[in-house]
Amino acid sequence: MIESLYTPMQVDLRKRARELAEKVMRPVAQQHDVEQSFPWPVQKAIKEAGLYGVWIPKEYGGMGGGVLDLCLVVEEFSRACGGMGVAYAVNALGSFPIIVGGTPEQKAKWLPRVASGEAMISFGLSEKEAGTDAGSMITRAEKAGDDYVLNGEKKWNTGGAVATYNTVFAVTAPGRGARGISAFVVEKGMPGYRVGKHEDKMGIRCVPVVEIHLENCRVPAANLLGGAEGHGFKHAMQTLDRARPGVAAQAVGLAQGALDLAMEYTRHRKQFGQTVDSFQGVQWMLADMATQIEAARQLVHHAARVIDSGARGISKVSAMCKLMATDTAMKVTTDCVQLFGGYGYCKDFPIEKYMRDAKITQIYEGTNQVQRLVIARNMLREASGAPE
Ligand code: CAA
């Protein structure tokens, strides 16, 4: 990192995140991966370090940082453990709808508790039959007096089992497509809100990914984000534009973490009487990986800076950084396993976990096929001269 390119707060954040990751996360990463258990001591350490407030505006108890600040922290956490990186970053995904679409009263009600780490928050968009085609969701929210009654099931709810709040998207006006979708903040313990199946996953095993059941779940009308129906899909898309660089930063962290391990291994592993890092074929692999990681990192930081500048039309660059960084992470972590040979395929070494953790980054918060769709749609719109 060339420190002069970053603010003093960003340099400090990155340093603190790295120290926490090395001291608190790395030593327990394998244990939580094996047990598929949530790392509560890690959550406590992040809370005590004040790092849940990074992306939350100062007036709501946060640090007032932006997407770049968030990405710097997520990269460092993910370098030690990809699951712990997303367990943290998903709180940004869950709270961005409040930041982009909530009323001042709603922001004042929920954001301070997220910023302090007292409450975690998840994001309830996907359903069994509505993944990539998020707009085809069927979870219904019907007005009943001062409440809305929610019925349906949400899928792939990352962090949902440990979150106090869940930003849930539901149909308030059937037949109106994306314009008939609204967002609600649903609080754990509300009658009719139930955490269901826990997925048994290939990677990111320390963070629970669950189904959420809404069975005549009564939510106060005051929890309708923005206080008006029909803006939920737009808020979901605006959220994903801001959150995808966080997934990209997770991918950069995973790739860097894997390369760190591969460097260490190849410097000590001997074959044919010499360490394997002395072979040119290995050196070229190391050089290619370092170059690909740095290119991905710089695209992530560029995208984050564009978003933080308040510019319009951020979807394309956000999708580009997610696509490039996550494909890089998959390639780099796979090549690092290759450098470990047979040992890389076994759980005695931590390297195989990096490859397992990397895979999901190409899938969640929009598959990389969706990212290509978003990029191409925006390219064609720009070429036609149509406004954003
Ligand atoms: N910002 C603001 N508004 C936007 C927007 C954006 N980036 N993108 C679309 N919209 C608006 C459009 O302007 C349009 O509004 P109007 O109806 O007023 O004209 C409306 O949204 C519908 O837009 P589209 O017709 O383009 O929508 P679409 O149905 O064709 O879908 C899509 C587009 C890009 C495929 C979108 O559905 C999508 O991003 N899908 C992937 C969803 C996703 O990422 N899911 C992951 C969820 S999180 C997760 O993975 C789990 C977890 O917990 C980590």
Image: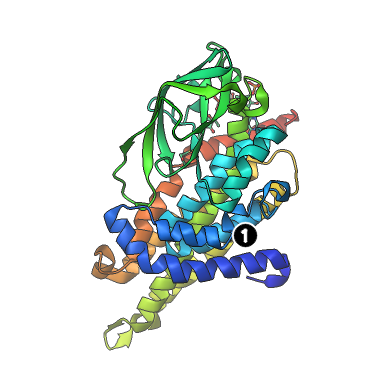
Is 296 positioned to the left or the right of 194 in the image? right
Relative image position of residue 281 (x, y in whole percent): 39, 74
The quadrant the C terminus occupies is top right
The quadrant where ligand 1 appears is top right
- The residue sitting at 59% across, 21% down in the picture is 221
Q: Residue at 47% across / 64% down in the picture?
A: 79
| Front-most of residues 166 and 116 | 116
- The image position of residue 57, as x and y in percent, is 70, 48
User: x, y percentage for residue 344?
Assistant: 29, 66
Q: Is residue 67 above or below residue 176?
A: below
Residue at position x 60%, y 25% in the image = 224
114 or 175, nearer to the observer: 114
Q: Is residue 105 visible?
A: yes
Residue at numbered disc 1: 298
| Residue at the extreme bottom | 273
Res 23 quadrant in image: bottom left
Q: Secondary structure at mark 1?
A: helix
Residue 295 picture quarter? bottom right
Say above or below: 384 vs 76. above
Is 150 on the left-hand or right-hand side of 68?
left
Q: Is residue 287 above or below residue 200?
A: below
Q: Position of residue 175 (x, y in %)?
A: 54, 10
Q: Nearer the viewer, residue 338 or 322?
A: 322
Q: Is residue 288 visible?
A: no
Q: Amino acid at mark 1?
A: Gln
